[in-house]
Amino acid sequence: MKQFLLLIAALSGAARLLAAPETPVIAYPEYSVRGTDDGIVIHDYENEPLLKIGTLNFSWAPPIAVPTAIEKNANDSLRISYRIDRDDSGEIKLDGVLKATPDGKIRIDWELDAPETVNVGGIMLELLPRNATTKSKDVYKSGLWIRHDRGGIPFEINDGYFRCFKNGNLALWMLLGGNSAYSNPWSEHLNFSRGEDGRHHASLELQISSPDLEGYAAGALFHRRPLGMRLVTDKAFNLWESGSPEVRVEIANPYDRARSAAFEITGRDFDGDIVLNEKKKLSLNPYETKELRFRLPAAERAIYFVEARLLPEGGKEIFCRTNLGILPPHRFEHLNESPFALASYFPIPSEEAVFQLMRRLGVRLLRHGDNRVSEQYEIISMLQDGVLPEESTPDAAEKLAAMIRRAREQRNPALEFCNEWNMGITTAADKRRMAAHYVELLRLLRDLRDRQYPELQIIGMGMAGADTEFLKFMAEYGAVPLMDGGVALHPGRGNMTPDYEGGGWTYLGAIRRWRETMNELGIKTLHLSEVYASTHPNDWWRDSYRQAAENLILTYAIGLAEGAKSIQFYQLHDSVWYDQGGVNHLDGEYHYGLLMRDGTLKPSLLAYAAIAEALDGARFTGYLDFGDRVHGITFRTPRGPLAIVYDRTDGFFLSEKSDDFAGTEPWIDTWKTHRKITFQTTGNEVITIDPIGRTRTVGATDGRVTLELSGAPLMVYGLKFQGGKQ
């Protein structure tokens, strides 16, 4: 009855609008669009104004486009003419066409003529909420899960970034065609691009929906998918301390007609065992949302990979994925001497939750942040800042002074100055010139530091790869005594394990080349201010999700063995700083995190916790080479001798270069060789720890134990060593 009354109200409202022929109107039962003297106004079914669409402001240039004439050129279309104010060229022309359809889709297309002297990159569209309409503060960044066309790892593609306007009757979901960060309470960015016709084109798309529709369902409605689905939990990061994790499946029908679909959900653990497998038929009434809950097994530590799948009648597959984990509480006893660090993080789902997670992981140091905040969590925040290579020393002086003031205000104990100036510079002459300029800036920075904040240590620029030539040029111009905090290195790593000591983008190889030059120049302190285990899906140069966990163990073991003061993983979350929580499957920069873009865990997050616990208070004692390609690293720890052992029978390279590379699922062990190796022990048993931190006790016989090794590192307490041998 309520829906019927609303429909009658909407029809009567539409009749009133249509009775005024002088007003250009497109009217439907659920909403209407009306032309006014200075723009377009969208109304709900009670004829309440929801949103006004007005001027276009060329924010990077003087002109403003003001709507002046709106004409109805079809039953579902309006033509918008604009007056151009502050047009010094006299050549700018703008026209728009709006089309509104009965199913709630509104689209405006603009065509712009502008001379090349006019910057059209920053055009902002005036969008003014009316009456009780609110504009969402956050952007909903929708991702659509798809299958890899060669059977690799499924992944998300960008399904649209949306801003929502709503009142008590309707919601307007706006697809952001421009930069979602260019926003204010009264306007949004439009992306005008030049077409083959020489004109600039931009569009705006809006979708009418009920006001209580969630973003995942709005995305489905916008793209005309029959159902929307998401996987959620009640835990930050989908991470439990104990017990049986529960995943919630929410399935929404955003349409006015019933839908049915076949549903199934599966879950696997790190070993590939199926721990959840259910199927059922679902029927959803118009506008109905169903909620299904499923439990995963309890464990001391675990990660579960969950996929939910819908097959609507007569439609295409819809699926989504998430990971759930169990990580028990742990108290680190030796944080003051810990090298465990992060290069970057985002406050997703919140800053408080993120700091609590970092504390649990054993993070001691952040590359940048406010130490007044982080010290509450026993975490030290440094400052990383700099200037661009093309900035002159006089022009940069105020920026350098501001850095010192900021560091002092935030109580940062150290400043890493500048970042990867050497990236892409190949000639010795260019490196020499750039190094000389860097040292000029460094000398000025040091002088400002000495006068304003003498407690601050200065760390030399984070270098992209072991560019020892650049470092030597810096030393030649006097950099070494100016860098009292040492130097920073970003060793990089491609499709090889961290213990590979070759040239190029390798980890151990880069560190050792860099350290050799440091020793020559008298530099003692090394910071690895970006280390990596990138998981860009189906990329032969990057790690799979499983390989990232394995390689992270060795990354930290080797970093500590090679004497790094800090080992800063880049970074906590997937996505990038200018698009936090964003989706871009084409850009590898979006896939460096220990967490997925939405803040849910990867296997490498558990690996970080596992190796931080194992190396808490550890001292490096030696590298092991047993012959027959069995290797290891040993440490003295408060919990006894620790050995990290692995087998390199399969070599150091994880993949071959390929244009059609298909990655592997995280529960698949890709090491071909698994060998049983016998070791001497210090007692009657040993404790083994795998890359995600699961422990196992293995009995020894006559002081010997047999363990199965592969290329994955295995942490073991209780093995007996003398030097680098047994």
Image (cartoon, grey):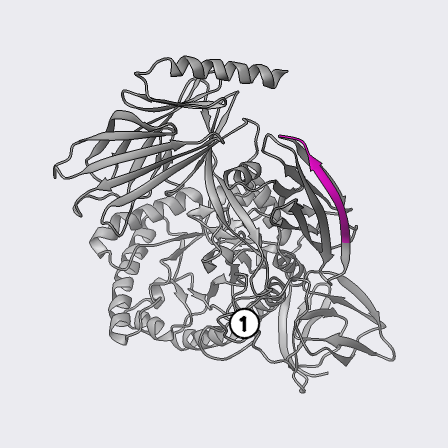
Q: Is residue 205 above or below residue 670?
A: above
Q: Position of residue 455 (x, y in %)?
A: 41, 52
Inspect the magenta stretch and tell me whether residue 91 lies in it. Answer: no
Residue lying at 73% horizontally and 70% vertically, measured from the top left: 716
| Figure quadrant of the C terminus | bottom right
Outermost bottom residue: 627
User: In the image shown, does 256 or 93 lie closer to the viewer?
Assistant: 256
Quarter holding residue 618: bottom right
Q: Which residue is mark 1?
A: 562
Above or below: residue 516 compared with residue 717:
below
Q: Nearer the viewer, residue 95 or 308?
A: 95
Local SS, label 1: loop
Q: Nearer the viewer, residue 524 or 17?
A: 17
Quadrant (top left, top right, bottom left, bottom right) of the N terminus? top right
Residue 523 at least partly seen: yes
Q: In which quadrant of the rendered view does residue 617 lie?
A: bottom right
Q: Which residues are magenta?
A: 276-286
Residue 582: x %, y % from top left:
48, 47
